Image (cartoon, rainbow, N blue to C red):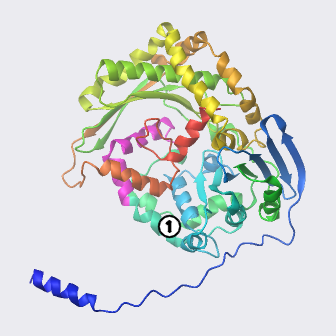
Amino acid sequence: AQTTADELEKLFMDSKEVKVAPPEEGAVISFQYTDFGPSLGTVVSDTLVAELNIRQLILSNNVRVNMKVTDFDQNYVAITARFGTGRLEQPPLPWFDGFAETVVDLGGLGKHSFDEIDSIFSDNSVWNGFYVNKDDFEFSAEIIADDMEPQLQLMAAYMIDPGYREEAVRSYKRDVPSFMNYLQHSLDGAIEYVDEWLWGNDGRFSLPATEEELLSYQGSDVKDWIHPQMTGGYLELSMVGDFDIDTVLPLVLKTFGALPERNLTAKEIGDEARDINFPNPPSYRTFTYTSKIQRAAAIVAFKIPPIKEDIRLSRRINVLADVFSNRIFETLRKSLGESYSPYAYADASTSFNQGYIWAESEGTPQVKAKNSQLIIDIAQNMSVSMTEDEFIRAKKPLQTDHEESRRDNYYWLYNVMWESQQKPWKLDWSRERDADYDSITLEELRVLAAEYLVPSNAVRIDVLPVAKDAGVQEDEGSARDLRQTVELIKGTLSGHTSRSSGRSFTMKEKTRHDKLRLS
Protein backbone atom coordinates (compact mmCIF):
# COMPACT_ATOMS: atom_id res chain seq x y z
CA ALA A 1 0.00 0.00 0.00
CA GLN A 2 1.14 3.55 -0.73
CA THR A 3 2.22 5.72 2.19
CA THR A 4 -0.26 8.55 2.75
CA ALA A 5 0.65 12.18 3.26
CA ASP A 6 -0.38 11.96 6.95
CA GLU A 7 1.84 8.95 7.48
CA LEU A 8 4.79 10.72 5.85
CA GLU A 9 4.24 13.75 8.06
CA LYS A 10 4.16 11.54 11.18
CA LEU A 11 7.39 9.79 10.15
CA PHE A 12 9.04 13.17 9.64
CA MET A 13 7.90 14.53 13.01
CA ASP A 14 8.99 11.34 14.80
CA SER A 15 12.43 11.55 13.17
CA LYS A 16 12.93 15.01 14.62
CA GLU A 17 12.74 13.52 18.11
CA VAL A 18 15.56 11.04 17.49
CA LYS A 19 18.83 12.17 19.02
CA VAL A 20 21.78 12.13 16.65
CA ALA A 21 25.28 11.84 18.06
CA PRO A 22 27.90 14.15 16.54
CA PRO A 23 30.43 12.40 14.31
CA GLU A 24 33.52 11.13 16.04
CA GLU A 25 36.64 13.08 15.29
CA GLY A 26 39.01 11.02 13.17
CA ALA A 27 42.62 10.58 14.07
CA VAL A 28 44.94 13.17 12.59
CA ILE A 29 46.97 11.57 9.80
CA SER A 30 50.55 12.71 9.30
CA PHE A 31 52.19 12.57 5.92
CA GLN A 32 54.60 9.64 5.90
CA TYR A 33 56.97 10.88 3.20
CA THR A 34 59.24 13.58 4.63
CA ASP A 35 62.58 11.73 4.64
CA PHE A 36 63.90 10.72 1.23
CA GLY A 37 67.31 9.39 2.07
CA PRO A 38 70.27 9.49 4.45
CA SER A 39 71.99 12.35 2.64
CA LEU A 40 70.86 15.50 0.89
CA GLY A 41 71.50 16.03 -2.76
CA THR A 42 74.11 18.50 -3.90
CA VAL A 43 74.39 20.78 -6.93
CA VAL A 44 77.05 19.56 -9.37
CA SER A 45 76.27 22.03 -12.17
CA ASP A 46 74.74 25.50 -11.96
CA THR A 47 74.12 27.55 -15.11
CA LEU A 48 72.38 30.90 -15.43
CA VAL A 49 70.73 31.56 -18.80
CA ALA A 50 71.07 35.29 -18.24
CA GLU A 51 69.00 36.73 -21.08
CA LEU A 52 66.02 34.52 -20.13
CA ASN A 53 66.68 34.67 -16.36
CA ILE A 54 66.49 30.88 -16.06
CA ARG A 55 68.71 28.95 -13.68
CA GLN A 56 69.53 25.38 -14.70
CA LEU A 57 70.93 22.87 -12.21
CA ILE A 58 72.13 19.28 -12.30
CA LEU A 59 71.99 17.52 -8.94
CA SER A 60 74.26 14.77 -7.63
CA ASN A 61 71.62 12.11 -8.37
CA ASN A 62 71.28 13.35 -12.00
CA VAL A 63 67.96 15.15 -11.43
CA ARG A 64 67.79 18.26 -13.63
CA VAL A 65 66.22 21.44 -12.20
CA ASN A 66 65.02 24.56 -14.08
CA MET A 67 64.03 27.63 -12.03
CA LYS A 68 62.70 31.06 -13.01
CA VAL A 69 61.51 33.75 -10.59
CA THR A 70 58.73 36.08 -11.81
CA ASP A 71 56.29 38.57 -10.33
CA PHE A 72 53.45 37.94 -12.81
CA ASP A 73 51.23 36.13 -10.31
CA GLN A 74 52.12 37.14 -6.78
CA ASN A 75 52.75 34.34 -4.28
CA TYR A 76 51.98 31.56 -6.79
CA VAL A 77 54.35 28.96 -8.22
CA ALA A 78 53.78 26.47 -11.06
CA ILE A 79 55.76 23.22 -10.90
CA THR A 80 56.22 20.26 -13.22
CA ALA A 81 58.23 17.06 -12.93
CA ARG A 82 58.58 15.36 -16.34
CA PHE A 83 60.12 11.97 -16.93
CA GLY A 84 59.98 8.94 -19.19
CA THR A 85 58.74 8.47 -22.74
CA GLY A 86 54.95 8.79 -22.45
CA ARG A 87 52.90 7.48 -25.35
CA LEU A 88 55.98 6.85 -27.47
CA GLU A 89 56.34 3.54 -25.62
CA GLN A 90 52.73 3.05 -24.52
CA PRO A 91 51.36 -0.48 -24.90
CA PRO A 92 49.10 -0.63 -28.00
CA LEU A 93 45.90 -0.74 -25.95
CA PRO A 94 42.77 1.42 -26.42
CA TRP A 95 42.82 4.51 -24.22
CA PHE A 96 45.35 2.96 -21.91
CA ASP A 97 46.83 6.40 -21.26
CA GLY A 98 43.54 7.53 -19.71
CA PHE A 99 43.43 4.43 -17.53
CA ALA A 100 47.01 5.04 -16.41
CA GLU A 101 46.25 8.65 -15.51
CA THR A 102 43.34 7.58 -13.34
CA VAL A 103 45.26 4.77 -11.63
CA VAL A 104 48.21 7.02 -10.75
CA ASP A 105 46.09 10.08 -9.89
CA LEU A 106 43.51 8.29 -7.74
CA GLY A 107 45.72 5.37 -6.71
CA GLY A 108 47.40 7.31 -3.92
CA LEU A 109 50.72 6.25 -2.45
CA GLY A 110 51.97 3.08 -0.82
CA LYS A 111 51.33 4.52 2.67
CA HIS A 112 48.33 6.73 1.91
CA SER A 113 45.11 6.38 -0.05
CA PHE A 114 44.01 9.20 -2.33
CA ASP A 115 41.38 10.22 0.23
CA GLU A 116 43.99 10.36 2.97
CA ILE A 117 46.23 12.55 0.84
CA ASP A 118 43.27 14.81 0.14
CA SER A 119 42.58 15.05 3.87
CA ILE A 120 46.21 15.64 4.86
CA PHE A 121 46.56 18.60 2.51
CA SER A 122 43.02 19.95 2.81
CA ASP A 123 44.15 23.13 4.57
CA ASN A 124 46.66 24.24 1.93
CA SER A 125 47.13 24.44 -1.84
CA VAL A 126 49.10 21.21 -2.25
CA TRP A 127 47.89 18.83 -4.96
CA ASN A 128 49.31 16.61 -7.67
CA GLY A 129 48.09 15.99 -11.22
CA PHE A 130 49.50 13.14 -13.32
CA TYR A 131 49.41 13.24 -17.12
CA VAL A 132 50.49 10.93 -19.92
CA ASN A 133 51.82 13.13 -22.71
CA LYS A 134 52.98 12.25 -26.20
CA ASP A 135 56.65 11.82 -25.23
CA ASP A 136 56.78 12.02 -21.43
CA PHE A 137 54.89 11.65 -18.17
CA GLU A 138 54.19 14.65 -15.98
CA PHE A 139 53.34 15.52 -12.41
CA SER A 140 52.27 19.15 -12.09
CA ALA A 141 50.69 21.62 -9.72
CA GLU A 142 50.16 25.32 -9.11
CA ILE A 143 50.48 26.27 -5.45
CA ILE A 144 50.92 29.10 -2.99
CA ALA A 145 54.64 29.68 -2.51
CA ASP A 146 54.44 28.98 1.24
CA ASP A 147 53.36 25.41 0.44
CA MET A 148 56.49 24.58 -1.54
CA GLU A 149 57.96 22.10 0.96
CA PRO A 150 54.89 19.83 1.30
CA GLN A 151 54.31 20.07 -2.46
CA LEU A 152 57.84 18.88 -3.22
CA GLN A 153 57.43 16.11 -0.63
CA LEU A 154 54.20 14.93 -2.27
CA MET A 155 55.66 14.97 -5.78
CA ALA A 156 58.82 13.21 -4.66
CA ALA A 157 56.74 10.57 -2.85
CA TYR A 158 54.96 9.72 -6.09
CA MET A 159 58.32 9.30 -7.81
CA ILE A 160 59.32 6.49 -5.43
CA ASP A 161 56.11 4.91 -4.07
CA PRO A 162 52.94 5.34 -6.17
CA GLY A 163 50.07 3.23 -4.87
CA TYR A 164 48.31 1.91 -8.02
CA ARG A 165 45.44 1.10 -5.66
CA GLU A 166 42.44 -1.00 -6.60
CA GLU A 167 39.96 1.76 -5.70
CA ALA A 168 41.36 3.82 -8.59
CA VAL A 169 40.74 0.92 -10.97
CA ARG A 170 37.16 0.61 -9.70
CA SER A 171 36.62 4.35 -10.15
CA TYR A 172 37.71 4.13 -13.79
CA LYS A 173 35.60 1.08 -14.54
CA ARG A 174 32.44 2.60 -13.07
CA ASP A 175 32.47 5.20 -15.84
CA VAL A 176 33.26 2.87 -18.75
CA PRO A 177 29.59 2.34 -19.82
CA SER A 178 29.01 6.09 -19.97
CA PHE A 179 32.19 6.57 -21.95
CA MET A 180 31.18 3.92 -24.50
CA ASN A 181 27.80 5.60 -24.82
CA TYR A 182 29.60 8.88 -25.53
CA LEU A 183 31.72 7.28 -28.24
CA GLN A 184 28.83 5.58 -29.98
CA HIS A 185 26.03 8.14 -29.61
CA SER A 186 27.52 11.65 -29.89
CA LEU A 187 29.17 13.70 -32.60
CA ASP A 188 32.12 14.41 -30.34
CA GLY A 189 32.57 10.69 -29.75
CA ALA A 190 32.48 9.96 -33.48
CA ILE A 191 35.18 12.58 -34.06
CA GLU A 192 37.38 10.66 -31.62
CA TYR A 193 37.32 7.88 -34.25
CA VAL A 194 38.34 10.40 -36.90
CA ASP A 195 41.42 11.17 -34.82
CA GLU A 196 42.13 7.46 -34.44
CA TRP A 197 42.07 7.10 -38.24
CA LEU A 198 44.27 10.15 -38.83
CA TRP A 199 46.77 8.67 -36.39
CA GLY A 200 47.01 5.61 -38.60
CA ASN A 201 44.90 3.38 -36.34
CA ASP A 202 48.06 3.11 -34.24
CA GLY A 203 47.32 1.04 -31.14
CA ARG A 204 48.69 3.76 -28.88
CA PHE A 205 45.95 6.11 -30.13
CA SER A 206 43.21 3.55 -30.59
CA LEU A 207 39.69 3.51 -29.16
CA PRO A 208 37.85 0.56 -27.65
CA ALA A 209 35.44 -1.52 -29.70
CA THR A 210 33.77 -2.96 -26.59
CA GLU A 211 33.46 -2.20 -22.89
CA GLU A 212 35.24 -5.46 -22.13
CA GLU A 213 38.50 -4.11 -23.52
CA LEU A 214 38.59 -1.29 -20.96
CA LEU A 215 37.20 -3.42 -18.14
CA SER A 216 40.04 -5.93 -18.55
CA TYR A 217 42.72 -3.45 -17.44
CA GLN A 218 44.42 -3.91 -14.06
CA GLY A 219 46.52 -1.59 -11.94
CA SER A 220 49.47 -3.94 -12.40
CA ASP A 221 49.35 -3.22 -16.15
CA VAL A 222 50.04 0.45 -15.42
CA LYS A 223 52.78 -0.39 -12.94
CA ASP A 224 54.56 -2.62 -15.46
CA TRP A 225 54.59 0.21 -18.00
CA ILE A 226 55.30 3.31 -15.91
CA HIS A 227 57.02 2.27 -12.68
CA PRO A 228 60.57 1.71 -14.02
CA GLN A 229 60.48 5.12 -15.73
CA MET A 230 58.94 6.81 -12.69
CA THR A 231 61.52 5.52 -10.24
CA GLY A 232 64.68 5.74 -12.36
CA GLY A 233 64.16 7.56 -15.65
CA TYR A 234 65.61 10.89 -16.75
CA LEU A 235 63.87 13.63 -14.77
CA GLU A 236 63.55 17.39 -15.19
CA LEU A 237 61.92 19.41 -12.41
CA SER A 238 60.85 22.89 -13.48
CA MET A 239 59.32 25.70 -11.46
CA VAL A 240 58.35 29.27 -12.26
CA GLY A 241 56.69 31.97 -10.21
CA ASP A 242 56.98 34.15 -7.15
CA PHE A 243 59.47 32.33 -4.92
CA ASP A 244 62.92 32.80 -3.42
CA ILE A 245 65.54 30.48 -4.92
CA ASP A 246 67.74 30.54 -1.81
CA THR A 247 64.76 29.35 0.24
CA VAL A 248 63.47 26.77 -2.23
CA LEU A 249 66.75 25.17 -3.33
CA PRO A 250 67.42 23.48 0.06
CA LEU A 251 63.88 22.05 -0.10
CA VAL A 252 64.60 20.65 -3.56
CA LEU A 253 67.87 19.11 -2.36
CA LYS A 254 66.24 17.24 0.52
CA THR A 255 63.35 15.94 -1.60
CA PHE A 256 64.15 15.44 -5.29
CA GLY A 257 67.87 15.73 -4.61
CA ALA A 258 67.71 12.86 -2.11
CA LEU A 259 65.93 10.45 -4.46
CA PRO A 260 67.81 7.39 -5.73
CA GLU A 261 70.08 8.07 -8.69
CA ARG A 262 68.30 8.74 -11.97
CA ASN A 263 69.36 8.23 -15.58
CA LEU A 264 71.72 11.00 -16.64
CA THR A 265 70.29 11.29 -20.15
CA ALA A 266 66.88 10.75 -21.70
CA LYS A 267 66.21 7.52 -23.56
CA GLU A 268 66.72 7.76 -27.32
CA ILE A 269 63.59 6.84 -29.28
CA GLY A 270 64.00 6.16 -32.99
CA ASP A 271 61.74 6.92 -35.94
CA GLU A 272 60.14 3.47 -35.84
CA ALA A 273 58.23 4.47 -32.70
CA ARG A 274 57.59 8.00 -33.97
CA ASP A 275 56.26 7.19 -37.45
CA ILE A 276 52.49 7.48 -37.96
CA ASN A 277 50.68 6.15 -41.04
CA PHE A 278 48.60 9.18 -41.95
CA PRO A 279 45.88 8.23 -44.51
CA ASN A 280 47.17 8.63 -48.06
CA PRO A 281 45.75 11.83 -49.57
CA PRO A 282 43.65 12.49 -51.48
CA SER A 283 41.01 10.35 -49.79
CA TYR A 284 37.47 10.50 -48.47
CA ARG A 285 35.74 8.70 -45.62
CA THR A 286 32.42 8.90 -43.81
CA PHE A 287 32.05 8.25 -40.09
CA THR A 288 28.65 7.74 -38.42
CA TYR A 289 27.21 7.64 -34.94
CA THR A 290 23.80 6.54 -33.69
CA SER A 291 21.67 9.44 -32.43
CA LYS A 292 18.42 11.29 -32.89
CA ILE A 293 20.34 14.57 -32.53
CA GLN A 294 20.92 15.97 -36.00
CA ARG A 295 24.49 17.24 -35.68
CA ALA A 296 27.07 16.57 -38.35
CA ALA A 297 30.61 17.70 -39.12
CA ALA A 298 32.54 18.32 -42.31
CA ILE A 299 36.28 17.92 -41.74
CA VAL A 300 39.32 18.24 -43.98
CA ALA A 301 42.86 17.40 -42.85
CA PHE A 302 45.82 18.61 -44.91
CA LYS A 303 49.07 16.82 -44.14
CA ILE A 304 51.98 19.00 -42.90
CA PRO A 305 55.45 18.19 -41.48
CA PRO A 306 56.04 17.57 -37.76
CA ILE A 307 57.99 20.04 -35.64
CA LYS A 308 61.69 19.31 -35.39
CA GLU A 309 64.54 21.35 -33.91
CA ASP A 310 64.01 24.06 -36.55
CA ILE A 311 60.57 25.48 -35.76
CA ARG A 312 60.48 28.23 -38.40
CA LEU A 313 58.38 26.27 -40.91
CA SER A 314 55.81 25.42 -38.25
CA ARG A 315 55.44 29.09 -37.32
CA ARG A 316 54.64 30.02 -40.90
CA ILE A 317 52.15 27.19 -41.19
CA ASN A 318 50.50 28.47 -37.99
CA VAL A 319 49.92 31.86 -39.59
CA LEU A 320 48.72 30.23 -42.82
CA ALA A 321 46.22 28.13 -40.84
CA ASP A 322 44.90 31.27 -39.16
CA VAL A 323 44.38 32.99 -42.53
CA PHE A 324 42.62 29.83 -43.75
CA SER A 325 40.46 29.72 -40.60
CA ASN A 326 39.34 33.31 -41.07
CA ARG A 327 38.45 32.68 -44.70
CA ILE A 328 36.47 29.52 -43.88
CA PHE A 329 34.59 31.44 -41.21
CA GLU A 330 33.74 34.30 -43.54
CA THR A 331 32.68 32.01 -46.36
CA LEU A 332 30.70 29.37 -44.46
CA ARG A 333 29.37 31.38 -41.52
CA LYS A 334 28.85 34.83 -42.96
CA SER A 335 28.11 34.06 -46.59
CA LEU A 336 26.19 30.79 -46.18
CA GLY A 337 24.64 31.48 -42.79
CA GLU A 338 26.10 28.51 -40.92
CA SER A 339 24.82 28.19 -37.35
CA TYR A 340 28.11 26.88 -35.93
CA SER A 341 31.47 28.58 -36.23
CA PRO A 342 33.79 26.83 -38.71
CA TYR A 343 37.50 27.03 -38.01
CA ALA A 344 40.94 25.68 -38.90
CA TYR A 345 44.21 25.29 -37.05
CA ALA A 346 47.62 23.66 -37.50
CA ASP A 347 48.48 20.68 -35.31
CA ALA A 348 52.07 19.49 -35.82
CA SER A 349 53.56 17.06 -33.34
CA THR A 350 56.91 17.62 -31.64
CA SER A 351 57.05 13.92 -30.68
CA PHE A 352 55.67 11.91 -33.59
CA ASN A 353 56.23 12.24 -37.33
CA GLN A 354 52.72 13.56 -37.74
CA GLY A 355 51.05 16.87 -38.53
CA TYR A 356 48.01 18.33 -40.26
CA ILE A 357 45.96 21.46 -40.74
CA TRP A 358 42.51 20.59 -39.44
CA ALA A 359 39.48 22.42 -40.84
CA GLU A 360 36.00 21.75 -39.49
CA SER A 361 32.44 22.97 -39.89
CA GLU A 362 29.50 21.68 -37.86
CA GLY A 363 25.78 21.91 -38.57
CA THR A 364 22.88 19.83 -39.86
CA PRO A 365 23.54 16.75 -42.02
CA GLN A 366 21.85 18.42 -45.00
CA VAL A 367 24.29 21.35 -44.93
CA LYS A 368 27.37 19.30 -44.07
CA ALA A 369 26.96 16.94 -47.03
CA LYS A 370 28.60 19.53 -49.31
CA ASN A 371 30.84 21.46 -46.91
CA SER A 372 33.88 19.19 -46.78
CA GLN A 373 34.29 19.64 -50.53
CA LEU A 374 33.62 23.37 -50.16
CA ILE A 375 36.45 23.61 -47.61
CA ILE A 376 38.80 22.06 -50.17
CA ASP A 377 37.58 24.51 -52.80
CA ILE A 378 38.34 27.41 -50.45
CA ALA A 379 41.80 26.00 -49.67
CA GLN A 380 42.98 25.53 -53.23
CA ASN A 381 42.45 29.22 -54.03
CA MET A 382 44.53 30.43 -51.09
CA SER A 383 47.87 30.48 -52.91
CA VAL A 384 46.70 32.99 -55.51
CA SER A 385 43.96 34.90 -53.69
CA MET A 386 45.39 35.48 -50.21
CA THR A 387 45.46 39.22 -49.54
CA GLU A 388 47.68 41.50 -47.49
CA ASP A 389 44.70 42.39 -45.33
CA GLU A 390 44.01 38.71 -44.55
CA PHE A 391 47.68 38.21 -43.75
CA ILE A 392 47.79 41.13 -41.32
CA ARG A 393 44.51 40.12 -39.63
CA ALA A 394 45.92 36.65 -38.94
CA LYS A 395 49.41 37.73 -37.91
CA LYS A 396 48.54 40.62 -35.61
CA PRO A 397 46.65 38.57 -32.96
CA LEU A 398 49.56 36.12 -32.80
CA GLN A 399 52.00 38.95 -32.21
CA THR A 400 49.75 40.30 -29.45
CA ASP A 401 49.59 36.84 -27.86
CA HIS A 402 53.35 36.58 -28.02
CA GLU A 403 53.83 39.92 -26.32
CA GLU A 404 51.43 38.93 -23.54
CA SER A 405 53.03 35.50 -23.14
CA ARG A 406 56.25 37.06 -21.86
CA ARG A 407 54.32 37.78 -18.66
CA ASP A 408 52.71 34.35 -18.44
CA ASN A 409 54.23 31.75 -16.11
CA TYR A 410 52.84 28.92 -18.17
CA TYR A 411 54.53 30.14 -21.33
CA TRP A 412 57.87 30.02 -19.56
CA LEU A 413 57.13 26.69 -17.93
CA TYR A 414 55.86 24.72 -20.95
CA ASN A 415 57.28 26.54 -23.96
CA VAL A 416 60.74 27.36 -22.68
CA MET A 417 61.82 25.56 -19.48
CA TRP A 418 60.00 22.26 -20.03
CA GLU A 419 62.61 19.69 -21.21
CA SER A 420 65.04 22.54 -21.92
CA GLN A 421 68.04 20.57 -20.64
CA GLN A 422 67.12 17.57 -22.78
CA LYS A 423 66.31 19.86 -25.74
CA PRO A 424 68.35 23.06 -25.30
CA TRP A 425 67.10 24.47 -28.61
CA LYS A 426 63.85 25.34 -26.83
CA LEU A 427 65.76 28.23 -25.26
CA ASP A 428 66.64 29.39 -28.76
CA TRP A 429 62.98 29.15 -29.76
CA SER A 430 62.21 31.74 -27.10
CA ARG A 431 65.18 33.97 -27.92
CA GLU A 432 64.36 34.36 -31.62
CA ARG A 433 60.59 33.80 -31.70
CA ASP A 434 59.36 37.39 -31.97
CA ALA A 435 61.88 38.44 -34.61
CA ASP A 436 61.11 35.34 -36.67
CA TYR A 437 57.34 35.90 -36.59
CA ASP A 438 57.90 39.55 -37.53
CA SER A 439 59.88 38.42 -40.58
CA ILE A 440 57.13 36.20 -42.02
CA THR A 441 55.88 37.49 -45.39
CA LEU A 442 52.71 37.06 -47.41
CA GLU A 443 54.70 35.52 -50.25
CA GLU A 444 55.99 32.78 -47.93
CA LEU A 445 52.42 31.87 -47.00
CA ARG A 446 51.35 31.76 -50.63
CA VAL A 447 54.15 29.30 -51.38
CA LEU A 448 53.13 27.12 -48.42
CA ALA A 449 49.47 27.25 -49.44
CA ALA A 450 50.40 26.02 -52.90
CA GLU A 451 52.26 23.10 -51.31
CA TYR A 452 49.91 22.04 -48.51
CA LEU A 453 46.40 23.50 -49.05
CA VAL A 454 45.70 21.60 -52.26
CA PRO A 455 43.19 18.82 -53.09
CA SER A 456 45.96 16.27 -53.69
CA ASN A 457 47.07 16.73 -50.05
CA ALA A 458 43.59 16.61 -48.50
CA VAL A 459 41.83 13.95 -46.48
CA ARG A 460 38.10 14.71 -46.59
CA ILE A 461 35.77 13.43 -43.86
CA ASP A 462 32.06 13.69 -43.17
CA VAL A 463 30.66 12.69 -39.77
CA LEU A 464 26.92 12.01 -39.84
CA PRO A 465 24.20 10.74 -37.49
CA VAL A 466 22.23 7.61 -38.34
CA ALA A 467 18.84 6.43 -37.06
CA LYS A 468 18.79 5.85 -33.32
CA ASP A 469 18.39 2.28 -32.11
CA ALA A 470 15.12 1.67 -30.34
CA GLY A 471 16.89 0.43 -27.25
CA VAL A 472 19.28 3.35 -26.92
CA GLN A 473 18.46 5.73 -24.10
CA GLU A 474 19.54 9.24 -25.00
CA ASP A 475 18.38 12.78 -24.39
CA GLU A 476 19.27 16.08 -25.97
CA GLY A 477 21.85 16.87 -23.31
CA SER A 478 23.50 13.46 -23.17
CA ALA A 479 26.38 14.19 -25.54
CA ARG A 480 27.16 17.41 -23.71
CA ASP A 481 26.88 15.83 -20.25
CA LEU A 482 28.98 12.83 -21.24
CA ARG A 483 31.85 15.18 -22.06
CA GLN A 484 32.24 15.65 -18.31
CA THR A 485 32.36 11.88 -17.86
CA VAL A 486 35.15 11.62 -20.41
CA GLU A 487 37.10 14.30 -18.56
CA LEU A 488 36.76 12.26 -15.39
CA ILE A 489 37.85 9.06 -17.11
CA LYS A 490 40.83 10.69 -18.75
CA GLY A 491 41.69 12.61 -15.61
CA THR A 492 40.84 16.27 -15.25
CA LEU A 493 42.87 18.42 -17.67
CA SER A 494 44.20 15.43 -19.65
CA GLY A 495 43.45 13.60 -22.81
CA HIS A 496 43.19 14.05 -26.56
CA THR A 497 43.78 17.21 -28.50
CA SER A 498 41.12 19.82 -27.82
CA ARG A 499 39.79 21.70 -30.79
CA SER A 500 40.03 25.47 -30.84
CA SER A 501 36.22 25.54 -30.72
CA GLY A 502 36.42 23.99 -27.27
CA ARG A 503 33.67 21.56 -28.10
CA SER A 504 35.15 18.16 -27.45
CA PHE A 505 38.20 16.63 -25.86
CA THR A 506 39.73 17.58 -22.58
CA MET A 507 41.73 20.59 -21.60
CA LYS A 508 45.23 19.26 -21.13
CA GLU A 509 46.09 18.75 -24.78
CA LYS A 510 44.28 21.95 -25.75
CA THR A 511 46.64 23.73 -23.38
CA ARG A 512 49.64 22.03 -25.01
CA HIS A 513 48.39 22.94 -28.50
CA ASP A 514 47.75 26.56 -27.53
CA LYS A 515 51.20 26.77 -26.00
CA LEU A 516 52.86 25.49 -29.17
CA ARG A 517 51.33 28.43 -31.01
CA LEU A 518 53.35 30.63 -28.67
CA SER A 519 56.69 28.94 -29.52
- Residue 63 occupies quadrant: bottom right
Residue indicated by mark 1: 169
Question: Is residue 156 depicted above or below 184 in this figure?
Answer: below
Question: Is residue 265 depicted above or below 114 in this figure?
Answer: above
- Residue ID at (43%, 18%): 327
What is the magenta range?
A: 177-203
The foreground one among 264 and 281 is 264
- Residue ID at (20%, 87%): 11
Q: What residue type is labelled 1?
A: Val
Q: Where is residue 340 in the image (x, y as percent from the top left)?
A: 33, 31
Q: Position of residue 29 (x, y in %)?
A: 62, 80
- Residue ID at (28%, 37%): 295
Question: Is residue 53 depicted above or below 57 in this figure?
Answer: above
Magenta region includes residue 489: no
Q: Where is residue 312 in the image (x, y as percent from the top left)?
A: 67, 23
**Disc 1 packing (10 Å; few <14; some 14–19; many ≥20):** many
Local SS, label 1: helix
Q: In which quarter of the image is the N terminus?
A: bottom left
- Residue ID at (85%, 42%): 48
